[in-house]
């Protein structure tokens, strides 16, 4: 007669150790997933803020260009200070104003 080799039984202690190790690995893995999702969310929020600031900067640049146009400056200079533009006066590229003229 052939006898079966004795089967090794898994002890409860080893089973509990395996269960604890598996649980720790799962907790670390799930924590990693949650952390990555939070970082992605904050990253998207920051990208939205950057996009909004870039749009605001573009609008401000457009306002600067509009306000620094020659026609606007010329009209303000003539209305407020009584200055006028003469084509032949800009050859030396310097304009001198006295302090009494700016008030």
Image: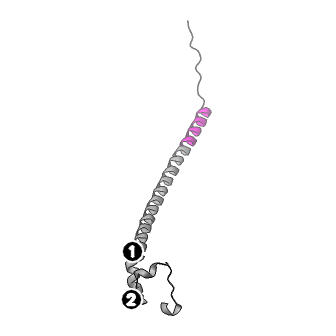
Give percent across and percent down for residue 90: 45, 79
> Label 2: which residue?
79
Q: Quadrant of the N terminus?
A: top right
Please give the name of the residue rendered at 49% of the width and 57% of the height, measured from the top-left corner: 42
Label 2 crowding class (10 Å Cα cut-off): few <14, some 14-19, many 20+? few
**Residue drawn where x is 48% and y is 53% of the image:** 40
| Residue 88 visible, this angle | yes
The residue closer to the viewer here, 15 or 56, is 56
- The magenta region covers 2-26
Q: Tell me the element at label 1.
A: helix
Q: Which residue is at a point 44% across and 82% down the rendered structure image?
A: 89
User: Does residue 97 appear to the left or right of 82 in the view shown?
Assistant: right
Residue 9 highlighted magenta (yes or no): yes
Compared to residue 72, the image places residue 80 above or below, namely: below
* Place of residue 96 in the rendered image (x, y in percent of width and height, measured from the top left): 51, 85
From mark 2 to mark 1, how far is it between C-alphas?
A: 18 Å
Residue 103 appears in the rendering:
no
**Residue 66 left/right relative to 19:** left
Q: Which residue has dot 1 on it? A: 66
Name the front one of labels 2 and 1: 2
**Magenta: predominant secondary structure element?**
helix
Pointer 1: residues within 10 angstroms few (<14), some, or many (20+)?
Answer: few
Q: Could you tell me residue 18's position as x and y percent?
A: 58, 35
């Amino acid at each position: 007669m052939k006898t079966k080799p004795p089967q090794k039984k898994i002890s409860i202690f080893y089973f509990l150790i395996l269960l604890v190790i598996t649980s720790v690995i799962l907790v670390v893995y799930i924590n990693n997933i949650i952390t990555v999702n939070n970082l992605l969310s904050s990253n998207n929020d920051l990208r939205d803020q950057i996009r909004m600031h870039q749009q605001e900067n573009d609008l401000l640049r457009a306002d600067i260009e509009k306000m620094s146009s020659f026609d606007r400056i010329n009209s303000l200079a003539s209305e407020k200070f009584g200055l006028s533009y003469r084509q032949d006066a800009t050859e030396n590229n310097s304009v001198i104003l006295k302090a009494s003229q700016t008030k």
